[in-house]
Every structure is written in C-alpha cells, then in structure tokens.
Image: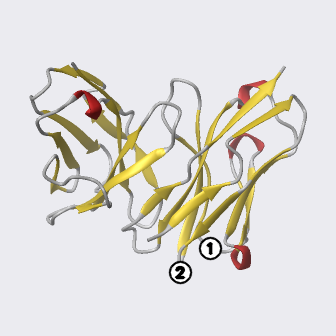
Amino acid sequence: AQSVSQHNHHVILSEAASLELGCNYSYGGTVNLFWYVQYPGQHLQLLLKYFSGDPLVKGIKGFEAEFIKSKFSFNLRKPSVQWSDTAEYFCAVKSRDGQNFVFGPGTRLSVLP
Amino acid sequence: GAVVSQHPSWVICKSGTSVKIECRSLDFQATTMFWYRQFPKQSLMLMATSNEGSKATYEQGVEKDKFLINHASLTLSTLTVTSAHPEDSSFYICSALQPNTEAFFGQGTRLTVV
C-alpha cells in the first residue's frame, strides 16, 4: 500500500520568509502527485499537480514543487509567504491506475504578519 | 475546475439511526470516487475507493458493513453510515476522479451523532 509522509507538523514563519514543505511517498509504481491547501473553514483546493514532464511544477499563488524521483519526494516551495498563506497543506499521491489516492498527514502553516 | 456536490453539508442524527451522504459529479463522469474521513485538525483518511458498477474497496480498519458505499451511476456515489454511534461523528469528504486528470472534492458533510 502506498503511504505519504510530510516532514513538519506545524511551521511558523514571518511574512516574506521562504517556505519549503517536505513530502515523501512510498509506492512502487508510477504515480501522480498533488499538493492541496485547506484554508480555515474551507474545503480542499488544488495548488498544483505533477503528472509527467518537467519535474518542476508551478502552481497557483506563487507555489511550486519539485518531483525528485530518486528521493520519492515532492517538496512544496514558495519564495516569499504572505499572511494569507496561513492554512493546512496536504501532499497527496495517486497511483496511475487511479485506484489509490492517499493524503499525507498535513502541515499547518502559520504566517505571522 | 469541475464541480463535485456533496449533500447534506451537515446532519445531526440520533444514535442507532442510519445516515446517507450523497456525492455527485455535476459536469463530468467519474468512474472512481473516493470517500475520506477527517478528524479535527487532522488529515484526510481514505476510507474506501468506489468504482462505478462494482463493490467498493475498503481500507484496512474500515468496517464495510457499517459504512455502505454504493456507486450505481457515473455521477453518483453514496455513503451510508449504518447504526450510527457518537464515535462516528466526523467530517466526511468525497472526491470524484476526472479520468486522466485530478480528483475534485466535495464540500464535505459534518456528521454529528447524539
């Protein structure tokens, strides 16, 4: 069975600081990778996704993620965070056949104004 | 993006009764839908994968007789919590997989069993 781990449970940053959230997965086959964000009181929204091609993926709101196949990692980055980025971030992995779609435990990001 | 509608958004029921939650993909056909449970301040826990026209695949530790999943059409999957108990109170989220792309999520259903 596939699993997803996220390195940090809670990250606290000041505005304008750079962000990197770690995500590692375990799965032997081909996968699609996702980062979702959940703002307080709202449902999940897709930030970005990787299916194939360029391993550096750019998403909405200035986020990007890099797929490193050899490390089974898909870390999320943003050069300069804003207070409005305060949210819960989930990494997710879908098997290519679509029969498994598993989320990591989530990382809470708090950005201080 | 595509729209997935989940209904109801909030339900309160008495212990021992059953509750049905619907998940509909409004503008695409979804052969696969997923059901998750989210506890407060925690991640989504995959409960089961539902394929249209076949039995759902349940994750380890999820009671299939308690959480009945039906995916009778390409746009509708239902989750029925049977004989609900207070410990079943949670936030249930469905997602529908748009073929060859991503999954889109419903807005979730908050179940409170009293």
Q: Position of residue A108 (x, y in %)?
A: 66, 36
Residue B14 occupies which quadrant of the picture?
top left
Is any part of residue B1 visible from this angle? no
Corner quadrant of residue A25: bottom right
- Number of marks present in the image shown: 2
Check disc 1 and report the residue beneath it.
Answer: A52
Please rate how many residues cluster around mark 2, counting C-alpha atoms within 10 Å: few if below 14, some from 14 to 19, many from 20.
few
The residue beneath circle 2 is: A28
> Does the CB distance between marks 2 and 1 fall below 8 Å?
no
Task: Classify residue A72 as left or right of residue B97.
Answer: right
Marks 2 and 1, Cα distance to the nearest angstrom? 16 Å
Is A53 left, or right, of B86 in this rendering?
right
Query: How far across and down, in percent of the image, does residue A13 sit?
Result: 84, 33
- Looking at the rendering, in which quadrant would you find the C terminus of chain B? top left
Q: Quadrant of residue A81?
A: top right
Q: Nearer the viewer, mark 2 or mark 1?
A: 2
Q: Which mark is residue B109?
A: none
Q: Whole-percent x and y of residue B113?
A: 23, 24
